[in-house]
Image: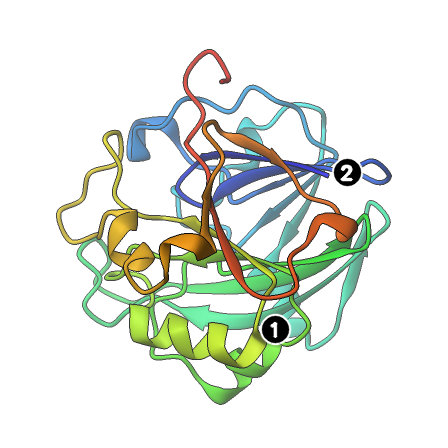
Amino acid sequence: MKIKWYGQAAFRLLPDTGPTIITDPYTPDVVGYAPIMDPADLVIRSSDDDTAHCRSDLISGSPEVVNGLEVAKSGGPVIAAGVTITAVEAAECDDHPDHDVPGKSGMSKFTLDGVTCAHMGDMGNDVTDAQIAFFEGTDVLFALTGGHPTTSLPDLQRIIEHARPRLIIPMHFRTLTYKPRSQFWVETFLDLYDDDQIDFALGCEAVVTAGSLPDSTRILVLDYARANGD
């Protein structure tokens, strides 16, 4: 499976077998990252009302669209494009700088090419036991590593220590393109780990397979895609 990071919480997952998935597509003018030009068969978005996470209408290919919040509220899995998706409800932090009322969202989990992936969406609430339990069995965790207004790093570490994902891919942190002063650079998260636990992809894409997953947790840092797609 090839994984591509566009920026913010938007990824493309291109499996050897199964549908191409894009997660949490953004509004380019809102977050500053390049427009997403790649098509998809399935879009999984954490909500339907956050312009930094919900713009499935900007994705080509006539994809099926799944709202993680709706899946979480339904209480059971849904199947879309042949993929079984589960979700747990989350919320923004109470003091979100852009929203007077904390928005609701869903964190999702699904399996492609034998690799179980979990995406943290836009969670900003204090982590709950139910949310921690949701991440059990995760192979690849797309993790919110920028801190406020998303989940705090101590809460993220509680999730990681319980779920023990084999690979963590950071997202939603401060970059040279996306520069909210309240968000950490990725180095703040990386400082929690030894250097020999961290890999850098040297680009916006990496190949992850069930056979290549490490035995113990490692961090894989991707660069964000530029306007030319690289």
Q: Horizontal and vertical percent for residue 15?
A: 77, 38
Identified by mark 1, the residue type is Lys
Q: Furthest-top residue in view? A: 228
Q: Is residue 196 left or right of residue 80?
A: left
Question: Which numbered dot is residue 73?
Answer: 1
Q: Furthest-front residue in view? A: 196
* Residue positioned 69% across, 77% down in the render: 75
Label 1 neighbour load within 10 Å: few <14, some 14-19, many 20+: few
Depth check: 114 or 147 in front? Answer: 114
Depth check: 100 or 61 in front? Answer: 61
Q: Is residue 76 left or right of residue 216?
A: right
Residue 123 in which image quadrant: bottom left
Q: Horizontal and vertical percent for residue 95?
A: 18, 68
Q: Is residue 82 left or right of residue 27?
A: right
Asked if the residue under mark 1 is in contact with the one under mark 2, i.e. CB atoms within 8 Å, the reply is: no
Per the model, the C-alpha gap separating discs 2 and 1 is 28 Å
Label 2 neighbour load within 10 Å: few <14, some 14-19, many 20+: some
Q: Furthest-bottom residue in view? A: 129
Depth check: 182 or 45 in front? Answer: 182
Identified by mark 2, the residue type is Pro
Q: Which residue is mark 2?
A: 15
Q: Is residue 89 above or below residue 21?
A: below
* Residue positioned 32% across, 61% down in the render: 150
SS under mark 2:
loop
* Residue positioned 57% across, 37% down in the render: 56
Give the colour scheme shown: rainbow
